[in-house]
Image (cartoon, rainbow, N blue to C red):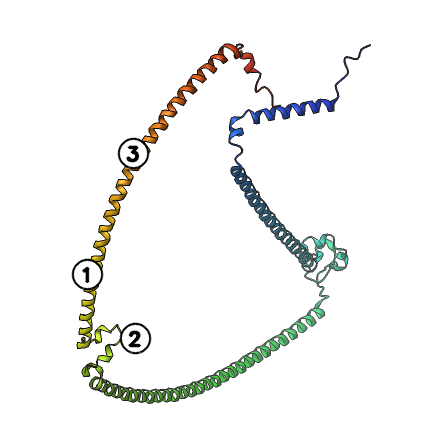
Amino acid sequence: MYKFDLPLDTREANAIARRRNCEEQRKSRIFDARTRQIGVDTAGLAAQIEEKRLRDQVENERKNAYDSEMIKNSQICTLLDTRQKNDTMRQNVELNKFRAEQQTAASRREFDLYDPESKKKDKPARVSDDDPRCQVSGLQLFQGEDLSAPERKKLQQEQMREWIKQQLSEKNREKEAAMHAENLYQKKMMELDARAVQLATEEEECRRNLNIATKSYNAALDAERKAKEAIDKQKELDDNFTELSNQVFGDTLTENPGVAQSSFGAHRVITDRWKGMSEEQKAEIQRIREQQQADKQRKTEEERELQKEYERSQLLQANAAILLERETARKAAEVEKKIAEENMRLQKEQKDALVKLTKEVYTNPPTDAYFTQFNTGTR
């Protein structure tokens, strides 16, 4: 039995598919004229990589900022949760304490229904003669009975005694409170009076010291002003005397020519102090001017001679250039004649070669199938 249904090796099939994929990618690169001739835009790729890196960096910084903010908010939430739990616990403790101290079972409105001591606290069947519970059918009260008269009188006397004691205590307390308040008021008034007297004394002393200091300061300022005025007056007198002396004995009125001498050299003067040139300076200037005129005339003669010599040399060079141009034209005509003869010979040789290629060499021209076999593979 032949095993035609056996599956192919998966690894071999993957290798064949990978090679085919690489071959297709290679064809797309090789047959693409733009990529083959221009190449890859490395600057653009580098810019894209840098832009992606910056974008990733900004995204990471933004993510880190969000993480930090989330951690901070989580810590704040934890702190607030802990504070809320502590507040709730403290409120529960205070509530239980208030219930234990203020909301006891005995303070309830229906406590008398289930009070275990209700029988002990209950009134007897008959309390007194005017007990409203003693009805005719109860056989607890009979006409002519006054069983609680002594206790009633004793209770009334005791009550009257307590009332009198309470009134006397209240009157004594009120009197003591009034005396205490009066004593406190008197002490406070005396303290305020003493404080006012002390403050008035201190204020008067401060005012006196301030007046003394102001008077001393004003006197010192007056003395300083007078001394300064005297110094300024003496200085003004000295300045006026110095100015008069400078004007009388100065170089302006005496017309000293040395004041116009500049510090930058003996040939320079200060224009606003210059008094004019001396006779020696004028004579020196005239001598220099005559010398300059003689030098200029001599240079003019020399330049005229140089110009004549230059014109002679230009004429000779022009004659030589004409002769050289004629010789060059003659040689150029000979070269052109030789080139024309050589071109005719090369033209005849090329025609003979073309006839030989057409009739003897290229006797089997290529068909379309010859050109379609190119650019079908990358190898």
Locate the C terminus by quadrant. top right
Q: Position of residue 121 (x, y in %)?
A: 74, 59
Kind of residue indicated by mark 2:
Ser
In this view, the residue in front, 306 or 356, is 306
Instruction: Say which residue appears at 58% left-offset and 80% top-offset.
Output: 176
Q: Is residue 278 visible?
A: no
In this view, the residue in front, 230 or 67, is 230
Kind of residue indicated by mark 1:
Gln
Instruction: Say which residue appears at 19% left-offset and 61% top-offset.
Output: 297
Q: Quadrant of residue 314?
A: top left
Question: Which badge, 2 or 3, comes first in the chain's sequence?
Answer: 2
Q: Position of residue 138 (x, y in %)?
A: 73, 54
In this view, the residue in front, 58 or 359, is 359
Question: Which badge, 1 or 2, comes first in the chain's sequence?
Answer: 2
Residue 25's place in the image compared with 229, above or below, is: above
Label of residue 58 in the image? none
Residues at circles 2 and 3 in contact by the CB criterion of under 8 Å: no
How far apart in space, not on screen, are marks 3 and 1 (Cα)? 44 Å
Tag 1 residue: 297
Kind of residue indicated by mark 3:
Arg
Tag 3 residue: 326
Locate the N terminus by quadrant. top right
Q: Quadrant of residue 82?
A: bottom right
